Image (cartoon, helix red, strand yellow):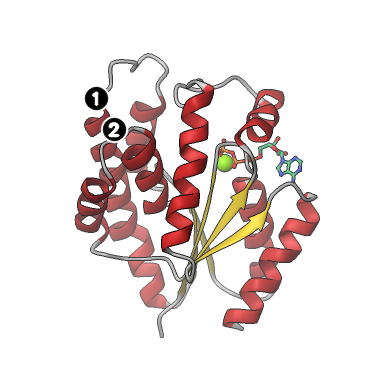
Amino acid sequence: MSGLFITMEGTDGSGKSTQLNLLSQYLEKKGFNIVFVREPGGTKIGEKIRDIILDINNKKMDYMTEAFLYASSRSQLVNEIIAPELKKGSIVICDRFVDSSIVYQGIARNIGIDVVKKINNIATGGLTPDITFFLDLSPQEAIKRKIQQKELDRLESEKDYFYKKVYDGYKLLISQNSERIKVIDATQSIENIHKNIVNYIESIFF
Ligand SMILES: Nc1ncnc2c1ncn2[C@@H]1O[C@H](COP(=O)(O)OP(=O)(O)OP(=O)(O)O)[C@@H](O)[C@H]1O
Ligand SMILES: [Mg+2]
């Protein structure tokens, strides 16, 4: 039996972690074996790579270096956790995946969608999520939520126009992957968003 691979995407502060926590709890209560990982990171090696990527002092980081670091972390995550767990039949839930790299590095950083797809194809062996949720929240609203929460890290302190590029990048990606990516209105209450996500998963898979 092969498991189910679910990913969550959206701009910073759109509610991904909030929703994934709720979804994991819900599916666990239903008796499924759930593995919940985040990107970048999710493994011991990947968390070290995450620290390098998010370090506020690494202002000189080359965009291609950044893209390779994300892909390296992802390669470790796929090979150490995601692929073996899917093989065992687990539901693997991942906070961000290749789509984030396509949007942030490929489109917003402008190193090109094709380049990012290529290096990620090597990193993941072509593994694609069964379903991806996109939490649709305007960049302005997302930033407001983040500022209330904590200090901004290196990526989060980018300028506004970067967030607009990210948001527009997601819209482009969604238009090209409308079968896989389910758009959820993230301006709703936490509870309603959770219900939308659960209803969709149950209508498709269970
Ligand atoms: N539907 C919602 N309505 C209002 N506030 C929300 C909603 N969902 C999440 N929040 C709040 O917004 C903030 C960001 O949420 P969360 O950390 O889940 O977002 P995220 O997408 O995981 O962010 P990041 O990209 O930084 O990981 C938190 O303070 C959270 O409590
Ligand atoms: Mg989060």
Query: Does residue 9 appear to the left or right of 109 in the view shown?
Result: right
Instruction: Give x and y (percent) for residue 116.
Output: 26, 47
Instruction: Give x and y (percent) for residue 143.
Output: 63, 29
Query: Does residue 48 appear to the left or right of 131 in the view shown?
Result: left
Find numbered disc 1 in the image and state the secondary structure of the residue it sits on: loop
Instruction: Report which quarter residue 54 is drawn in.
Output: top left
Q: Is residue 188 above or below residue 166?
A: below
Find numbered disc 2 in the image and state the secondary structure of the residue it sits on: helix
Instruction: Give x and y (percent) for residue 71.
Output: 27, 46
Query: Does residue 90 appear to the left or right of 189 in the view shown?
Result: left
User: Please, what is the three-letter code of the amino acid marked with disc 2?
Assistant: Glu
Residue position for label 1: 62
The structure residue drawn at horizontal position 48% and vertical position 48%, both measured from the top left corner, is 170
Residue position for label 2: 66
Instruction: Give x and y (percent) for residue 64.
Output: 22, 33
For ligand 1, give the image quadrant: top right
